[in-house]
Image (cartoon, coloured by chain):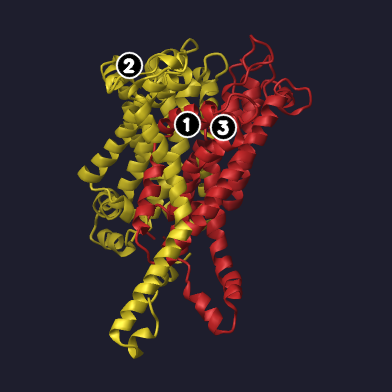
Protein backbone atom coordinates (compact mmCIF):
# COMPACT_ATOMS: atom_id res chain seq x y z
CA UNK A 1 0.00 0.00 0.00
CA UNK A 2 1.48 3.33 -0.98
CA UNK A 3 2.15 5.97 1.60
CA UNK A 4 -0.01 8.67 0.03
CA UNK A 5 -3.27 6.72 0.05
CA UNK A 6 -2.51 5.84 3.62
CA UNK A 7 -2.11 9.45 4.61
CA UNK A 8 -5.35 10.32 2.88
CA UNK A 9 -7.18 7.58 4.67
CA UNK A 10 -5.88 8.51 8.00
CA UNK A 11 -6.99 12.04 7.44
CA UNK A 12 -10.53 10.77 7.11
CA UNK A 13 -12.65 12.74 9.58
CA UNK A 14 -14.55 11.16 12.44
CA UNK A 15 -18.07 10.25 11.38
CA UNK A 16 -20.32 13.25 11.80
CA UNK A 17 -22.59 12.43 14.73
CA UNK A 18 -25.77 13.87 13.22
CA UNK A 19 -25.35 14.91 9.63
CA UNK A 20 -27.53 17.81 8.56
CA UNK A 21 -29.21 18.09 11.93
CA UNK A 22 -27.30 21.06 13.30
CA UNK A 23 -28.34 23.71 10.80
CA UNK A 24 -32.11 23.49 10.89
CA UNK A 25 -33.09 22.20 14.29
CA UNK A 26 -32.73 24.26 17.47
CA UNK A 27 -29.62 23.62 19.50
CA UNK A 28 -31.25 21.68 22.29
CA UNK A 29 -32.89 19.17 19.98
CA UNK A 30 -29.69 18.72 18.06
CA UNK A 31 -27.85 17.95 21.26
CA UNK A 32 -30.45 15.39 22.24
CA UNK A 33 -30.33 13.80 18.82
CA UNK A 34 -26.58 13.74 18.96
CA UNK A 35 -26.44 12.12 22.36
CA UNK A 36 -29.09 9.59 21.29
CA UNK A 37 -27.03 8.77 18.33
CA UNK A 38 -23.86 8.64 20.38
CA UNK A 39 -25.55 6.31 22.80
CA UNK A 40 -26.72 4.06 19.99
CA UNK A 41 -23.24 4.07 18.55
CA UNK A 42 -21.72 3.20 21.91
CA UNK A 43 -24.20 0.38 22.32
CA UNK A 44 -23.43 -1.00 18.88
CA UNK A 45 -19.72 -0.66 19.59
CA UNK A 46 -19.97 -2.75 22.70
CA UNK A 47 -22.25 -5.31 21.03
CA UNK A 48 -19.57 -5.81 18.41
CA UNK A 49 -16.47 -5.59 20.56
CA UNK A 50 -17.95 -7.00 23.76
CA UNK A 51 -17.65 -10.71 22.95
CA UNK A 52 -13.96 -10.40 22.13
CA UNK A 53 -13.40 -8.37 25.29
CA UNK A 54 -15.22 -10.87 27.50
CA UNK A 55 -13.37 -13.83 25.98
CA UNK A 56 -10.03 -12.14 26.53
CA UNK A 57 -10.81 -11.52 30.18
CA UNK A 58 -12.22 -15.02 30.64
CA UNK A 59 -9.09 -16.72 29.36
CA UNK A 60 -6.59 -14.62 31.29
CA UNK A 61 -8.02 -12.55 34.10
CA UNK A 62 -10.05 -15.39 35.55
CA UNK A 63 -7.15 -17.91 35.55
CA UNK A 64 -4.68 -15.46 37.09
CA UNK A 65 -7.15 -14.61 39.87
CA UNK A 66 -7.72 -18.32 40.43
CA UNK A 67 -3.96 -18.83 40.49
CA UNK A 68 -3.59 -16.11 43.11
CA UNK A 69 -6.31 -17.74 45.23
CA UNK A 70 -4.75 -21.20 44.90
CA UNK A 71 -1.34 -19.79 45.75
CA UNK A 72 -2.53 -19.02 49.26
CA UNK A 73 -3.03 -22.69 50.04
CA UNK A 74 -0.81 -25.64 50.67
CA UNK A 75 -2.50 -27.72 48.02
CA UNK A 76 -1.13 -30.83 46.34
CA UNK A 77 -3.16 -32.98 43.97
CA UNK A 78 -1.38 -36.01 45.38
CA UNK A 79 -3.06 -35.27 48.72
CA UNK A 80 -6.05 -33.04 47.91
CA UNK A 81 -7.69 -33.53 51.31
CA UNK A 82 -4.74 -32.02 53.16
CA UNK A 83 -5.40 -28.60 51.62
CA UNK A 84 -4.73 -25.86 54.14
CA UNK A 85 -4.53 -22.08 54.11
CA UNK A 86 -0.98 -20.82 54.40
CA UNK A 87 -1.38 -17.18 53.40
CA UNK A 88 1.73 -15.91 51.72
CA UNK A 89 3.70 -18.91 52.99
CA UNK A 90 4.28 -20.32 49.51
CA UNK A 91 5.77 -17.03 48.38
CA UNK A 92 8.14 -17.00 51.34
CA UNK A 93 9.23 -20.55 50.54
CA UNK A 94 9.87 -19.72 46.88
CA UNK A 95 11.64 -16.42 47.42
CA UNK A 96 13.97 -17.90 50.05
CA UNK A 97 14.79 -20.88 47.84
CA UNK A 98 18.03 -20.52 45.86
CA UNK A 99 16.39 -22.49 43.02
CA UNK A 100 14.06 -19.57 42.27
CA UNK A 101 16.95 -17.10 42.18
CA UNK A 102 19.11 -19.43 40.08
CA UNK A 103 16.28 -19.84 37.56
CA UNK A 104 15.62 -16.13 37.66
CA UNK A 105 19.26 -15.40 36.87
CA UNK A 106 19.28 -17.94 34.00
CA UNK A 107 16.06 -16.52 32.55
CA UNK A 108 17.33 -12.98 32.86
CA UNK A 109 20.64 -13.89 31.23
CA UNK A 110 18.87 -15.57 28.31
CA UNK A 111 16.61 -12.55 27.93
CA UNK A 112 19.38 -9.95 27.93
CA UNK A 113 21.80 -11.86 25.70
CA UNK A 114 19.21 -12.90 23.13
CA UNK A 115 17.63 -9.45 22.92
CA UNK A 116 21.00 -7.73 22.48
CA UNK A 117 22.13 -10.20 19.83
CA UNK A 118 18.77 -10.02 18.07
CA UNK A 119 18.78 -6.24 18.07
CA UNK A 120 22.18 -6.15 16.37
CA UNK A 121 21.37 -8.90 13.87
CA UNK A 122 17.85 -7.60 13.35
CA UNK A 123 19.13 -4.11 12.59
CA UNK A 124 21.65 -5.46 10.11
CA UNK A 125 18.94 -7.52 8.45
CA UNK A 126 16.51 -4.59 8.39
CA UNK A 127 19.11 -2.30 6.79
CA UNK A 128 19.89 -4.96 4.20
CA UNK A 129 16.21 -5.35 3.32
CA UNK A 130 15.69 -1.59 3.37
CA UNK A 131 18.45 -0.98 0.84
CA UNK A 132 17.89 -4.07 -1.30
CA UNK A 133 16.35 -3.79 -4.75
CA UNK A 134 12.75 -4.85 -4.99
CA UNK A 135 13.32 -8.33 -6.40
CA UNK A 136 15.93 -9.20 -3.85
CA UNK A 137 13.77 -7.84 -1.05
CA UNK A 138 11.03 -10.38 -1.76
CA UNK A 139 13.51 -13.23 -1.71
CA UNK A 140 15.10 -12.05 1.55
CA UNK A 141 11.74 -11.56 3.22
CA UNK A 142 10.58 -15.02 2.20
CA UNK A 143 13.78 -16.56 3.55
CA UNK A 144 13.60 -14.86 6.93
CA UNK A 145 9.92 -15.69 7.34
CA UNK A 146 10.78 -19.38 7.42
CA UNK A 147 12.33 -19.18 10.90
CA UNK A 148 9.46 -16.94 11.96
CA UNK A 149 6.82 -19.44 10.89
CA UNK A 150 8.56 -22.61 11.99
CA UNK A 151 7.43 -24.32 15.19
CA UNK A 152 9.76 -23.42 18.08
CA UNK A 153 9.96 -27.07 19.10
CA UNK A 154 11.14 -27.97 15.59
CA UNK A 155 13.79 -25.27 15.78
CA UNK A 156 14.87 -26.63 19.15
CA UNK A 157 15.24 -30.15 17.76
CA UNK A 158 17.12 -28.90 14.68
CA UNK A 159 19.70 -27.09 16.80
CA UNK A 160 19.82 -29.89 19.36
CA UNK A 161 20.55 -32.61 16.79
CA UNK A 162 23.19 -30.48 15.08
CA UNK A 163 25.11 -29.98 18.33
CA UNK A 164 24.35 -33.29 20.05
CA UNK A 165 27.46 -35.32 20.75
CA UNK A 166 26.08 -38.54 19.24
CA UNK A 167 24.07 -37.32 16.24
CA UNK A 168 25.59 -33.91 15.58
CA UNK A 169 28.18 -32.68 13.10
CA UNK A 170 29.09 -29.39 14.75
CA UNK A 171 31.93 -30.94 16.75
CA UNK A 172 33.63 -32.28 13.64
CA UNK A 173 33.00 -29.13 11.59
CA UNK A 174 34.32 -26.77 14.21
CA UNK A 175 37.12 -28.79 15.81
CA UNK A 176 39.53 -26.03 14.75
CA UNK A 177 37.86 -23.72 17.27
CA UNK A 178 39.68 -23.88 20.61
CA UNK A 179 37.63 -25.86 23.10
CA UNK A 180 35.53 -27.63 20.49
CA UNK A 181 36.41 -31.23 19.75
CA UNK A 182 34.87 -34.66 19.32
CA UNK A 183 34.50 -35.03 23.08
CA UNK A 184 32.65 -31.80 23.71
CA UNK A 185 29.21 -32.61 25.07
CA UNK A 186 27.39 -29.32 24.58
CA UNK A 187 24.46 -30.33 26.72
CA UNK A 188 26.48 -31.44 29.73
CA UNK A 189 27.56 -27.94 30.77
CA UNK A 190 25.61 -24.84 31.66
CA UNK A 191 27.46 -22.39 29.44
CA UNK A 192 27.48 -24.49 26.30
CA UNK A 193 23.84 -25.54 26.75
CA UNK A 194 22.76 -21.94 27.14
CA UNK A 195 24.78 -21.04 24.06
CA UNK A 196 22.79 -23.47 21.89
CA UNK A 197 19.48 -22.54 23.55
CA UNK A 198 20.09 -18.84 22.88
CA UNK A 199 21.25 -19.61 19.32
CA UNK A 200 17.97 -21.38 18.59
CA UNK A 201 15.97 -18.60 20.21
CA UNK A 202 17.84 -15.91 18.27
CA UNK A 203 17.48 -17.75 14.97
CA UNK A 204 13.76 -18.19 15.42
CA UNK A 205 12.88 -14.67 16.55
CA UNK A 206 15.35 -12.30 14.86
CA UNK A 207 13.10 -12.13 11.75
CA UNK A 208 10.28 -10.67 13.82
CA UNK A 209 12.44 -7.96 15.35
CA UNK A 210 14.01 -7.15 11.97
CA UNK A 211 10.58 -6.71 10.35
CA UNK A 212 9.54 -4.30 13.10
CA UNK A 213 12.79 -2.38 12.63
CA UNK A 214 12.30 -2.40 8.86
CA UNK A 215 8.91 -0.77 9.32
CA UNK A 216 10.57 1.77 11.59
CA UNK A 217 13.28 2.47 9.02
CA UNK A 218 10.62 3.28 6.46
CA UNK A 219 9.54 6.16 8.68
CA UNK A 220 12.93 7.84 8.81
CA UNK A 221 12.65 10.83 6.48
CA UNK A 222 14.86 10.15 3.47
CA UNK A 223 15.78 13.81 2.98
CA UNK A 224 17.20 14.02 6.50
CA UNK A 225 19.58 11.21 5.71
CA UNK A 226 20.36 12.79 2.36
CA UNK A 227 21.10 16.11 4.04
CA UNK A 228 23.46 14.43 6.51
CA UNK A 229 25.20 12.76 3.59
CA UNK A 230 25.63 16.07 1.80
CA UNK A 231 27.03 17.57 4.98
CA UNK A 232 29.70 14.88 4.92
CA UNK A 233 28.49 12.57 7.68
CA UNK A 234 29.98 9.08 7.57
CA UNK A 235 27.70 6.02 7.30
CA UNK A 236 28.16 5.33 11.00
CA UNK A 237 27.36 8.94 11.93
CA UNK A 238 24.24 8.86 9.78
CA UNK A 239 23.21 5.66 11.50
CA UNK A 240 23.75 6.87 15.06
CA UNK A 241 22.76 10.53 14.61
CA UNK A 242 19.95 10.35 12.07
CA UNK A 243 18.48 6.87 11.72
CA UNK A 244 18.46 5.65 15.32
CA UNK A 245 17.05 8.84 16.92
CA UNK A 246 14.29 8.96 14.31
CA UNK A 247 13.10 5.43 14.95
CA UNK A 248 13.61 5.27 18.68
CA UNK A 249 9.95 4.39 19.26
CA UNK A 250 10.04 1.44 16.89
CA UNK A 251 13.27 0.17 18.47
CA UNK A 252 11.90 0.44 21.99
CA UNK A 253 8.70 -1.40 21.13
CA UNK A 254 10.57 -4.15 19.31
CA UNK A 255 12.95 -4.56 22.25
CA UNK A 256 10.21 -4.61 24.86
CA UNK A 257 8.12 -7.15 22.97
CA UNK A 258 11.06 -9.43 22.40
CA UNK A 259 12.27 -9.03 25.99
CA UNK A 260 8.88 -10.08 27.35
CA UNK A 261 8.80 -12.96 24.92
CA UNK A 262 12.31 -14.09 25.80
CA UNK A 263 11.54 -13.87 29.50
CA UNK A 264 8.79 -16.46 28.99
CA UNK A 265 11.15 -18.86 27.18
CA UNK A 266 10.13 -22.47 27.64
CA UNK A 267 10.11 -24.62 24.50
CA UNK A 268 13.82 -24.48 23.64
CA UNK A 269 14.91 -25.26 27.19
CA UNK A 270 12.37 -28.05 27.64
CA UNK A 271 13.47 -29.82 24.45
CA UNK A 272 17.22 -29.37 24.75
CA UNK A 273 18.04 -29.82 28.43
CA UNK A 274 14.77 -29.94 30.34
CA UNK A 275 16.54 -27.74 32.88
CA UNK A 276 19.54 -30.01 33.47
CA UNK A 277 22.94 -28.54 34.44
CA UNK A 278 21.52 -25.34 35.87
CA UNK A 279 19.72 -24.30 32.70
CA UNK A 280 16.24 -24.25 34.19
CA UNK A 281 14.18 -21.14 33.44
CA UNK A 282 11.24 -19.75 35.44
CA UNK A 283 8.53 -21.02 33.09
CA UNK A 284 9.99 -24.49 33.36
CA UNK A 285 10.10 -24.23 37.15
CA UNK A 286 6.41 -23.32 37.21
CA UNK A 287 5.56 -26.17 34.83
CA UNK A 288 7.64 -28.71 36.76
CA UNK A 289 6.09 -27.70 40.08
CA UNK A 290 2.44 -27.67 39.08
CA UNK A 291 2.09 -30.09 36.17
CA UNK A 292 5.06 -32.34 36.99
CA UNK A 293 4.77 -32.56 40.77
CA UNK A 294 1.09 -31.61 41.04
CA UNK A 295 1.86 -29.00 43.71
CA UNK A 296 -0.94 -26.67 42.68
CA UNK A 297 -0.48 -24.19 45.53
CA UNK A 298 3.25 -23.79 45.07
CA UNK A 299 2.99 -23.84 41.27
CA UNK A 300 0.31 -21.16 41.35
CA UNK A 301 2.52 -18.97 43.51
CA UNK A 302 5.34 -19.31 40.97
CA UNK A 303 2.87 -18.48 38.19
CA UNK A 304 1.78 -15.33 39.99
CA UNK A 305 5.40 -14.30 40.62
CA UNK A 306 6.19 -14.85 36.95
CA UNK A 307 3.25 -12.68 36.02
CA UNK A 308 4.50 -9.98 38.39
CA UNK A 309 7.95 -10.19 36.80
CA UNK A 310 6.43 -9.54 33.37
CA UNK A 311 4.47 -6.61 34.77
CA UNK A 312 7.67 -5.33 36.36
CA UNK A 313 9.57 -5.44 33.08
CA UNK A 314 6.71 -3.57 31.40
CA UNK A 315 6.66 -0.99 34.17
CA UNK A 316 10.39 -0.39 33.97
CA UNK A 317 10.23 -0.11 30.19
CA UNK A 318 7.33 2.31 30.20
CA UNK A 319 8.38 4.46 33.14
CA UNK A 320 12.15 4.42 32.77
CA UNK A 321 12.57 4.15 29.02
CA UNK A 322 9.31 5.88 28.14
CA UNK A 323 8.21 3.24 25.68
CA UNK A 324 4.90 4.37 24.24
CA UNK A 325 3.31 1.03 23.49
CA UNK A 326 -0.12 2.28 22.58
CA UNK A 327 1.16 5.12 20.43
CA UNK A 328 3.69 3.01 18.62
CA UNK A 329 1.19 0.24 18.04
CA UNK A 330 -1.09 2.36 15.95
CA UNK A 331 -3.55 3.52 18.57
CA UNK A 332 -4.27 7.14 17.99
CA UNK B 1 20.39 4.21 -5.10
CA UNK B 2 20.92 4.20 -8.86
CA UNK B 3 19.12 1.62 -10.94
CA UNK B 4 22.37 0.32 -12.39
CA UNK B 5 24.51 -1.35 -9.80
CA UNK B 6 28.26 -1.32 -10.11
CA UNK B 7 30.02 -4.67 -10.28
CA UNK B 8 31.33 -4.15 -6.81
CA UNK B 9 27.83 -3.53 -5.48
CA UNK B 10 26.58 -6.61 -7.29
CA UNK B 11 29.21 -8.80 -5.65
CA UNK B 12 28.38 -7.31 -2.26
CA UNK B 13 24.70 -7.95 -2.70
CA UNK B 14 25.35 -11.51 -3.85
CA UNK B 15 27.46 -12.17 -0.75
CA UNK B 16 24.90 -10.59 1.57
CA UNK B 17 22.04 -12.54 0.01
CA UNK B 18 23.89 -15.84 0.35
CA UNK B 19 24.74 -15.10 3.98
CA UNK B 20 21.12 -14.27 4.83
CA UNK B 21 19.75 -17.28 2.97
CA UNK B 22 22.18 -19.68 4.64
CA UNK B 23 21.52 -18.16 8.05
CA UNK B 24 17.77 -18.35 7.64
CA UNK B 25 17.55 -21.78 6.09
CA UNK B 26 20.48 -23.77 7.41
CA UNK B 27 18.81 -25.23 10.52
CA UNK B 28 15.88 -26.34 8.36
CA UNK B 29 18.29 -27.97 5.95
CA UNK B 30 20.06 -29.57 8.88
CA UNK B 31 16.98 -31.33 10.24
CA UNK B 32 15.94 -32.22 6.67
CA UNK B 33 19.23 -34.07 6.23
CA UNK B 34 18.86 -35.80 9.59
CA UNK B 35 15.42 -36.99 8.54
CA UNK B 36 16.93 -38.88 5.59
CA UNK B 37 19.47 -40.76 7.68
CA UNK B 38 18.67 -44.41 8.27
CA UNK B 39 18.67 -45.90 11.79
CA UNK B 40 22.30 -46.99 11.50
CA UNK B 41 23.45 -43.61 10.21
CA UNK B 42 21.75 -41.28 12.65
CA UNK B 43 25.00 -41.06 14.59
CA UNK B 44 27.24 -40.76 11.56
CA UNK B 45 28.31 -37.31 12.72
CA UNK B 46 28.04 -35.95 9.19
CA UNK B 47 25.77 -33.25 7.80
CA UNK B 48 24.69 -35.21 4.72
CA UNK B 49 23.27 -38.68 5.16
CA UNK B 50 25.93 -41.24 4.14
CA UNK B 51 23.11 -43.16 2.53
CA UNK B 52 19.71 -41.65 1.77
CA UNK B 53 16.85 -43.53 3.35
CA UNK B 54 13.14 -42.90 3.74
CA UNK B 55 12.81 -45.22 6.75
CA UNK B 56 11.91 -42.32 9.06
CA UNK B 57 9.10 -41.14 6.84
CA UNK B 58 7.73 -44.67 6.63
CA UNK B 59 7.80 -44.81 10.41
CA UNK B 60 5.50 -41.80 10.76
CA UNK B 61 3.40 -42.00 7.60
CA UNK B 62 3.16 -45.57 6.28
CA UNK B 63 0.50 -47.88 7.62
CA UNK B 64 2.05 -50.05 10.28
CA UNK B 65 4.85 -47.55 10.90
CA UNK B 66 5.84 -47.55 14.57
CA UNK B 67 4.96 -43.89 15.10
CA UNK B 68 2.26 -43.55 12.47
CA UNK B 69 -0.73 -43.63 14.78
CA UNK B 70 0.91 -41.18 17.18
CA UNK B 71 1.97 -38.73 14.49
CA UNK B 72 -1.16 -38.72 12.36
CA UNK B 73 -3.48 -38.23 15.31
CA UNK B 74 -1.27 -35.38 16.52
CA UNK B 75 -1.38 -33.84 13.07
CA UNK B 76 -5.15 -34.11 13.00
CA UNK B 77 -5.39 -32.51 16.45
CA UNK B 78 -3.00 -29.70 15.57
CA UNK B 79 -4.70 -28.79 12.30
CA UNK B 80 -8.21 -29.04 13.76
CA UNK B 81 -7.59 -27.23 17.02
CA UNK B 82 -5.46 -24.48 15.48
CA UNK B 83 -7.97 -23.90 12.68
CA UNK B 84 -10.94 -23.67 15.04
CA UNK B 85 -9.07 -21.38 17.44
CA UNK B 86 -8.08 -19.21 14.48
CA UNK B 87 -11.59 -18.98 13.05
CA UNK B 88 -13.17 -18.10 16.40
CA UNK B 89 -10.51 -15.49 17.11
CA UNK B 90 -10.74 -13.91 13.68
CA UNK B 91 -14.54 -13.73 13.75
CA UNK B 92 -14.59 -12.12 17.21
CA UNK B 93 -11.68 -9.85 16.31
CA UNK B 94 -13.29 -8.76 13.03
CA UNK B 95 -16.38 -7.56 14.89
CA UNK B 96 -14.30 -5.85 17.54
CA UNK B 97 -11.90 -4.26 15.08
CA UNK B 98 -14.77 -3.00 12.94
CA UNK B 99 -16.21 -1.28 16.00
CA UNK B 100 -12.82 0.15 16.96
CA UNK B 101 -12.07 1.44 13.49
CA UNK B 102 -15.48 2.83 12.59
CA UNK B 103 -17.45 3.68 15.68
CA UNK B 104 -16.85 6.16 18.40
CA UNK B 105 -17.55 4.62 21.76
CA UNK B 106 -16.13 4.80 25.26
CA UNK B 107 -13.92 1.82 26.05
CA UNK B 108 -12.14 1.64 22.70
CA UNK B 109 -8.82 2.25 24.36
CA UNK B 110 -9.70 -0.20 27.12
CA UNK B 111 -10.23 -2.98 24.61
CA UNK B 112 -6.97 -2.29 22.81
CA UNK B 113 -5.07 -2.04 26.08
CA UNK B 114 -6.60 -5.30 27.27
CA UNK B 115 -5.54 -6.99 24.05
CA UNK B 116 -2.04 -5.70 24.60
CA UNK B 117 -2.05 -6.91 28.21
CA UNK B 118 -3.30 -10.36 27.23
CA UNK B 119 -0.64 -10.71 24.53
CA UNK B 120 2.19 -10.20 27.02
CA UNK B 121 0.64 -12.57 29.55
CA UNK B 122 2.94 -15.46 30.46
CA UNK B 123 1.23 -18.61 29.19
CA UNK B 124 2.64 -20.68 31.99
CA UNK B 125 0.79 -18.52 34.54
CA UNK B 126 -2.55 -19.56 33.08
CA UNK B 127 -1.67 -23.20 32.70
CA UNK B 128 -1.75 -24.19 36.37
CA UNK B 129 -5.29 -22.99 37.16
CA UNK B 130 -6.60 -24.30 33.84
CA UNK B 131 -5.01 -27.69 34.42
CA UNK B 132 -6.82 -27.99 37.74
CA UNK B 133 -10.12 -26.60 36.44
CA UNK B 134 -10.13 -28.66 33.24
CA UNK B 135 -9.63 -31.87 35.23
CA UNK B 136 -12.62 -31.00 37.40
CA UNK B 137 -15.01 -30.10 34.60
CA UNK B 138 -13.91 -32.72 32.09
CA UNK B 139 -12.16 -30.49 29.56
CA UNK B 140 -8.73 -32.01 30.23
CA UNK B 141 -7.36 -33.78 27.16
CA UNK B 142 -10.14 -32.59 24.83
CA UNK B 143 -10.21 -30.29 21.81
CA UNK B 144 -12.23 -27.52 23.51
CA UNK B 145 -9.77 -27.77 26.41
CA UNK B 146 -7.08 -26.46 24.06
CA UNK B 147 -9.20 -24.25 21.80
CA UNK B 148 -10.28 -22.04 24.72
CA UNK B 149 -6.78 -21.25 26.01
CA UNK B 150 -5.52 -20.86 22.43
CA UNK B 151 -7.85 -17.88 22.18
CA UNK B 152 -5.60 -16.12 24.67
CA UNK B 153 -2.86 -16.43 22.04
CA UNK B 154 -4.80 -15.75 18.85
CA UNK B 155 -7.39 -13.17 19.89
CA UNK B 156 -5.23 -10.22 21.04
CA UNK B 157 -2.95 -10.24 18.00
CA UNK B 158 -6.00 -10.57 15.72
CA UNK B 159 -7.65 -7.53 17.29
CA UNK B 160 -4.50 -5.41 16.98
CA UNK B 161 -3.74 -6.43 13.45
CA UNK B 162 -7.31 -6.11 12.18
CA UNK B 163 -7.90 -2.77 13.90
CA UNK B 164 -4.81 -1.43 12.14
CA UNK B 165 -5.97 -2.86 8.81
CA UNK B 166 -9.51 -1.55 9.15
CA UNK B 167 -8.28 1.94 10.02
CA UNK B 168 -6.88 2.19 6.51
CA UNK B 169 -10.03 1.18 4.68
CA UNK B 170 -11.59 4.19 2.93
CA UNK B 171 -15.03 3.72 4.45
CA UNK B 172 -16.44 6.70 2.56
CA UNK B 173 -16.39 4.48 -0.54
CA UNK B 174 -19.34 2.66 0.97
CA UNK B 175 -21.41 5.84 1.02
CA UNK B 176 -20.19 6.71 -2.45
CA UNK B 177 -21.48 3.38 -3.75
CA UNK B 178 -24.83 4.02 -2.08
CA UNK B 179 -25.05 7.44 -3.65
CA UNK B 180 -24.43 5.74 -6.96
CA UNK B 181 -27.50 3.59 -6.35
CA UNK B 182 -26.17 0.49 -4.58
CA UNK B 183 -28.23 -0.93 -1.72
CA UNK B 184 -26.48 -0.90 1.69
CA UNK B 185 -25.92 -4.64 1.43
CA UNK B 186 -24.50 -4.34 -2.08
CA UNK B 187 -22.28 -1.50 -0.97
CA UNK B 188 -20.98 -3.58 1.90
CA UNK B 189 -20.52 -6.76 -0.11
CA UNK B 190 -19.08 -5.30 -3.28
CA UNK B 191 -17.02 -2.47 -1.82
CA UNK B 192 -16.12 -3.12 1.79
CA UNK B 193 -15.70 -6.90 1.81
CA UNK B 194 -13.10 -6.93 -0.99
CA UNK B 195 -11.18 -4.19 0.81
CA UNK B 196 -11.32 -5.90 4.20
CA UNK B 197 -10.79 -9.49 3.07
CA UNK B 198 -6.99 -9.33 2.58
CA UNK B 199 -6.55 -7.98 6.11
CA UNK B 200 -8.78 -10.67 7.56
CA UNK B 201 -6.95 -13.37 5.64
CA UNK B 202 -3.52 -12.11 6.70
CA UNK B 203 -4.64 -11.92 10.31
CA UNK B 204 -5.95 -15.48 10.12
CA UNK B 205 -2.60 -16.63 8.76
CA UNK B 206 -0.65 -15.01 11.59
CA UNK B 207 -3.08 -16.28 14.23
CA UNK B 208 -2.81 -19.78 12.78
CA UNK B 209 0.99 -19.69 12.96
CA UNK B 210 0.78 -18.74 16.62
CA UNK B 211 -1.72 -21.46 17.52
CA UNK B 212 0.23 -24.02 15.47
CA UNK B 213 3.39 -23.10 17.42
CA UNK B 214 1.94 -23.62 20.91
CA UNK B 215 3.79 -26.04 23.15
CA UNK B 216 3.05 -25.29 26.82
CA UNK B 217 -0.73 -25.71 26.61
CA UNK B 218 -0.20 -28.76 24.43
CA UNK B 219 1.93 -30.65 26.93
CA UNK B 220 0.10 -29.44 30.03
CA UNK B 221 -3.54 -29.88 29.13
CA UNK B 222 -3.44 -33.16 27.23
CA UNK B 223 -2.31 -36.64 28.10
CA UNK B 224 -3.23 -38.87 25.16
CA UNK B 225 -3.54 -38.78 21.40
CA UNK B 226 -7.15 -37.58 21.88
CA UNK B 227 -6.04 -33.95 21.79
CA UNK B 228 -2.25 -33.80 21.88
CA UNK B 229 -0.98 -31.46 19.14
CA UNK B 230 2.17 -31.96 17.07
CA UNK B 231 4.74 -29.92 19.04
CA UNK B 232 3.78 -31.73 22.25
CA UNK B 233 3.68 -35.11 20.51
CA UNK B 234 7.21 -34.53 19.14
CA UNK B 235 8.52 -34.06 22.66
CA UNK B 236 6.99 -37.37 23.73
CA UNK B 237 7.99 -39.47 20.72
CA UNK B 238 9.68 -42.71 21.62
CA UNK B 239 11.95 -44.80 19.45
CA UNK B 240 10.95 -48.02 17.70
CA UNK B 241 12.40 -49.86 20.66
CA UNK B 242 13.00 -48.73 24.20
CA UNK B 243 16.71 -48.24 23.67
CA UNK B 244 16.47 -46.52 20.36
CA UNK B 245 16.56 -42.74 20.23
CA UNK B 246 13.61 -41.39 18.20
CA UNK B 247 15.88 -38.88 16.43
CA UNK B 248 14.97 -40.03 12.92
CA UNK B 249 11.22 -40.14 13.43
CA UNK B 250 11.19 -36.75 15.16
CA UNK B 251 13.21 -35.19 12.35
CA UNK B 252 10.90 -36.62 9.70
CA UNK B 253 7.81 -35.42 11.58
CA UNK B 254 9.42 -32.01 12.07
CA UNK B 255 10.03 -31.76 8.33
CA UNK B 256 6.46 -32.79 7.51
CA UNK B 257 4.97 -30.08 9.76
CA UNK B 258 7.41 -27.49 8.42
CA UNK B 259 6.40 -28.00 4.78
CA UNK B 260 3.05 -26.20 5.10
CA UNK B 261 4.79 -23.30 6.86
CA UNK B 262 7.27 -22.94 4.01
CA UNK B 263 4.50 -23.10 1.40
CA UNK B 264 2.43 -20.44 3.18
CA UNK B 265 5.45 -18.20 3.63
CA UNK B 266 6.44 -18.46 -0.03
CA UNK B 267 2.91 -17.77 -1.22
CA UNK B 268 2.05 -14.98 1.18
CA UNK B 269 5.30 -13.33 2.31
CA UNK B 270 4.09 -9.87 1.34
CA UNK B 271 0.84 -10.21 3.28
CA UNK B 272 2.50 -11.73 6.34
CA UNK B 273 5.06 -8.93 6.51
CA UNK B 274 2.41 -6.24 6.19
CA UNK B 275 0.29 -7.96 8.83
CA UNK B 276 3.17 -8.31 11.28
CA UNK B 277 4.26 -4.70 10.97
CA UNK B 278 0.73 -3.33 10.61
CA UNK B 279 -0.22 -3.84 14.20
CA UNK B 280 3.21 -2.96 15.47
CA UNK B 281 4.12 0.41 14.06
CA UNK B 282 2.00 3.41 13.37
CA UNK B 283 1.47 3.55 9.69
Q: Residues within 10 Å of mark 2 (few under 14, many from 20)?
A: some
**Mark 2 → mark 3, Cα distance in angstroms:** 33 Å
Provide the secondary structure element on which disc 1 rests: helix
The answer for which chain carries disc 2 is A
x 60%, y 36%: residue? B143
Chain the render paints red: B
Residue named by callout 1:
B130
Query: Where A321 falls versus A233 (above or below)?
Result: above
x 55%, y 20%: residue? A169
Callout 1–callout 3 Cβ contact below 8 Å: no
Q: Residues within 10 Å of mark 1 (few under 14, many from 20)?
A: many
Residue A99's mark?
2
Task: Provide residue A66's location: percent of width, then percent of height.
Answer: 39, 32
Q: Nearer the viewer, mark 2 or mark 1?
A: 1
Provide the secondary structure element on which disc 2 rests: helix
Q: Quadrant of residue A122?
A: top left
**Mark 2 → mark 1, Cα distance in angstroms:** 25 Å
The answer for which chain carries disc 3 is B
Q: Earlier in the sequence, mark 1 or mark 3?
A: 1
User: Can you see residue B256?
Assistant: no
Q: Are marks 2 and 1 on the same chain?
A: no
Task: Provide residue B139's location: percent of width, then percent of height.
Answer: 56, 32
User: Can you see residue A189?
Assistant: yes
x 61%, y 51%: residue? B267
Query: Where A245 falls versus A17 (above or below)?
Result: above
Instruction: Look at the image and give the colour of chain A.
Output: yellow
The answer for which chain carries disc 1 is B
Callout 2–callout 1 Cβ contact below 8 Å: no
Residue named by callout 3:
B139
Amino acid sequence: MSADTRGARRAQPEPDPAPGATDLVPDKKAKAARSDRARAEARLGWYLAGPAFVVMLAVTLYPILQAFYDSLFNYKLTAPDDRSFVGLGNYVVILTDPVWWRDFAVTFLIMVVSVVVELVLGFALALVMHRAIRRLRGLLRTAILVPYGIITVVSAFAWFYAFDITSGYVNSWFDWVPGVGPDLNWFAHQGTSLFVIIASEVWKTTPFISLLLLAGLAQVPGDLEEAAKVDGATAWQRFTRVIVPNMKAAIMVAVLFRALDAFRIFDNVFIMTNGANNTEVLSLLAYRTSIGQLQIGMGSAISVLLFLCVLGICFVAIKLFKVDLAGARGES
Amino acid sequence: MGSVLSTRARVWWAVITVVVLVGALFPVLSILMTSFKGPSEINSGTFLPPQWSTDNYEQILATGGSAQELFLSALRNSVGISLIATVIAVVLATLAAYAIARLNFPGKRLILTTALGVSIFPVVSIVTPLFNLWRNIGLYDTWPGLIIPYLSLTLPISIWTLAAFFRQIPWELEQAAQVDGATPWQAFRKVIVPLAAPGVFTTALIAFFIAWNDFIYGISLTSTSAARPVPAALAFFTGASYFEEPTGAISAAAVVVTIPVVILVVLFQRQIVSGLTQGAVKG
